[in-house]
Amino acid sequence: MNIFRFEHPQALYLLLLIPLLAFIHLYLARRRKKALEEFGNTELLNDLMPNVSFKRPTIKFYILLWAFITLIITIAGPQYGTKLETVKRKGIEIIVALDVSNSMMAQDIEPNRLERAKRAISRLIDKLQNDRVGLIVFAGEAFVQLPITTDYPSAKMFLNSIDTDIVSTQGTAIGAALQKGISSFTSQEDVNRAIIVITDGENHEDDPVAVAAAAAEKGIKVYTVGMGLPKGAPIPVKGGRSNDFMKDLNNNVVISKLDEETLQKIAITGNGAYIPANNIRNGINNLVDELSQLEKSELEAKVYTDYDDQFQYFAAFALLLIILEFLILERKNRRLKHINIFEVKQNKE
């Protein structure tokens, strides 16, 4: 399967000019029409200017607009990947386990715990080089969202699609997430591995400390990132009003609090480190620095190493449109204006 890409994707930002150009043309066309209406009766003016066309300038403009769009695509350099090769790179394997339980929607950190966690993961992925990364989502149970890969753009795409509805069983099973992470690494030996658990730490389902100990025995480091504040915050009701919060059986508002003690125990047992949410930017940077110090192993990855340029087809189409725009005259041709190829001649009997 070939892969499509742009060699210079930043050129596509020029496409933002298209709506502006269309708006300017529409505005000027309306001004011209209004000026003609103020000058006199439009039907009378049409009779006085039989060779003037009011439609052709618009047609010419939109042909040029499409030519401009095609030229932008040409400049962006469309390419097809044609050669898939297995390459070897030095790196480590990282599994990120993200808590998607309802408590992650608490807003004790802005805009909410889940969104802040996704931003942190995105920054982490941006800093990786040649490492394999996988995504696990968990609440009352854990699922693999993205198998371990070196395809960072796909990782960020899957990350953006994550919300609290992705796991139907509610709860916070950190132990299940760790167990799923342990089993999600590749079978390659002699590779340094790490699991990064991002959660508010309110575990109600299992014993994550014991699973972290099992991970450490396998040489897997376990890091925890605490999302939220110890004082806690209410959990908004999804789809409700801004002041609608989840309540318990006694109709009391549920306050979700960060359980730092549990997360610290998991990190210590897993030979990793704990990062609090109030220092997450520096914490992620420190985490990346610590991961980069781990010994790198040769990792195999399948990547496209050869691309065929496709810009010439777009360039030819743009040239065709420009020629077509040039051939269309703004004024009607005196000799051809009376010819109507759709007119049906009636035979006189």
Image (tube, rainbow, N blue to C red):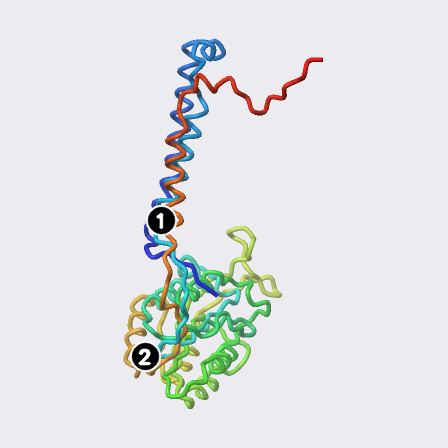
Mark 2 element type: strand
In which quadrant of the rendered view does residue 25 lie? top left
Q: Which residue is mark 2?
A: 90
Q: Which residue occupies 43% across, 20% down?
A: 333
Disc 2/disc 1 C-alpha distance (Å): 35 Å
- Looking at marks 2 and 1 on the same chain, the residue that comes earlier in the sequence is marked by 1
Q: Which residue occupies 54% across, 54% down?
A: 244
Given the image, on which type of amino acid does mark 1 rest? Thr
Asked whether the viewer can see residue 174, the reply is: yes
Asked whether the viewer can see residue 19, the reply is: no
Q: Which residue is mark 1?
A: 74
Residues 290 and 301: in front is 301
Q: Is residue 138 left or right of residue 125?
A: right
In this picture, is 207 found above or below 336? Answer: below
Residues 215 and 148: in front is 148
Q: Residue 34 location, x and y as percent?
A: 42, 17
In which quadrant of the rendered view does residue 71 lie? top left
In this picture, is 27 found above or below 155? Answer: above
In which quadrant of the rendered view does residue 349 lie? top right
User: For mark 1, does the 10 Å Cα neighbourhood hold few (<14), some (14 to 19), or many (20 or more) residues?
Assistant: many
Residues 188 and 63: in front is 63
In this picture, is 90 found above or below 127? Answer: below
Q: Residue 279 location, x and y as percent?
A: 32, 67
Q: Is residue 101 left or right of residue 306?
A: right
* Callouts 2 and 1 close, C-beta under 8 Å: no
User: For mark 2, does the 10 Å Cα neighbourhood hold few (<14), some (14 to 19), or many (20 or more) residues?
Assistant: some
